[in-house]
Image: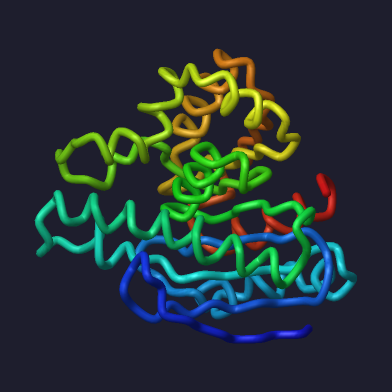
Amino acid sequence: MNRQLTSWFSPSLQKEMPLAVYGHYGFALLLIPTAAADYLEYERFQLLDSIRPYIESGKVKVFSIDSINNESWMNNSMDPRHKSVRHQQWNQYVYSDVIPFIKTQTSEDTAIITSGASFGALHSANLFFKRPDLINGCIAMSGVYDLTEYTKGYFDEDVYYNSPCHYLPNLTDHGILEQIRKSSHIHILSGSGDYEDPDAARRLSGILYNKGIWYELDIWGKDMTHDWPTWRAMLPHYLASRF
């Protein structure tokens, strides 16, 4: 499996940001880490090994980036407003830095699908819903889509506009809604085992239903806990059966 590591200084974040690329061809899968993890997390926990056949066959080319959750919502020593600003800066990094980089490594027409587990699921869904002109869909695994679950009671406009369960019900922009509706790859997955929250997936799905947005809700069994074996089962199954 071809593997390349690179980094560059992000003007949006004012820091060096690393990125890992796996594979040669295929649609682009943009992986967002869990919690306060880094761009190599999915490699360390063998999720890349679980999807190796689809990378090596040219079905998918994977781009794995850093989160800055430890500089925002996971940092208990920061002022909440600063956390909110930092989150917005990270969004801008993805849209202004990462998406153009993916285009140079694939093509202008290559589909980009975001994916992540746990906190990475919220980010992957949010990035898509906010900019469906740049991103073509998401595979969100074991997520909670209400950002206030992470903000410890803090709420401002930036929290609202990065919390799909808050802003999607009120989204009326016809152009954005139609771009979201064009996607055939909105996959919302959850287990039913320990520390999973399948009702969070159901709540997001209900919002999408009420907006006339196609989605796939897939609740797995009680043997699927909030842990890596679940995600190593989910992602290859979806790459094999939906793409």
Where 240 falls versus 132 (above or below)?
A: below
The answer to which of 16 and 139 lies nearer the viewer is 16
Horizontal and vertical percent position of residue 164: 43, 33
Image coordinates of residue 215 in percent, x first then y, are 66, 29
Would residue 148 be found to the left or right of residue 132 on screen?
A: left
Residue ID at (53%, 40%) = 192
Front-lying residue, 164 or 234: 164
Q: Quadrant of the N terminus?
A: bottom right
Residue depicted at 56% across the width and 23% down the height = 208
- Residue 40, relative to residue 239: is it above or below? below
- How many badges with numbers are in the image? 0
Q: Which residue is depicted at the point 45% across and 25% down?
A: 168
The image quarter containing residue 83 is bottom left
Residue 96 against residue 185 in the figure, above or below = below
Q: Is residue 42 visible?
A: yes
Estimate the x, y position of residue 66 in percent, counting from the top left: 45, 71
- Residue 88 percent location from the top left of the image: 33, 52
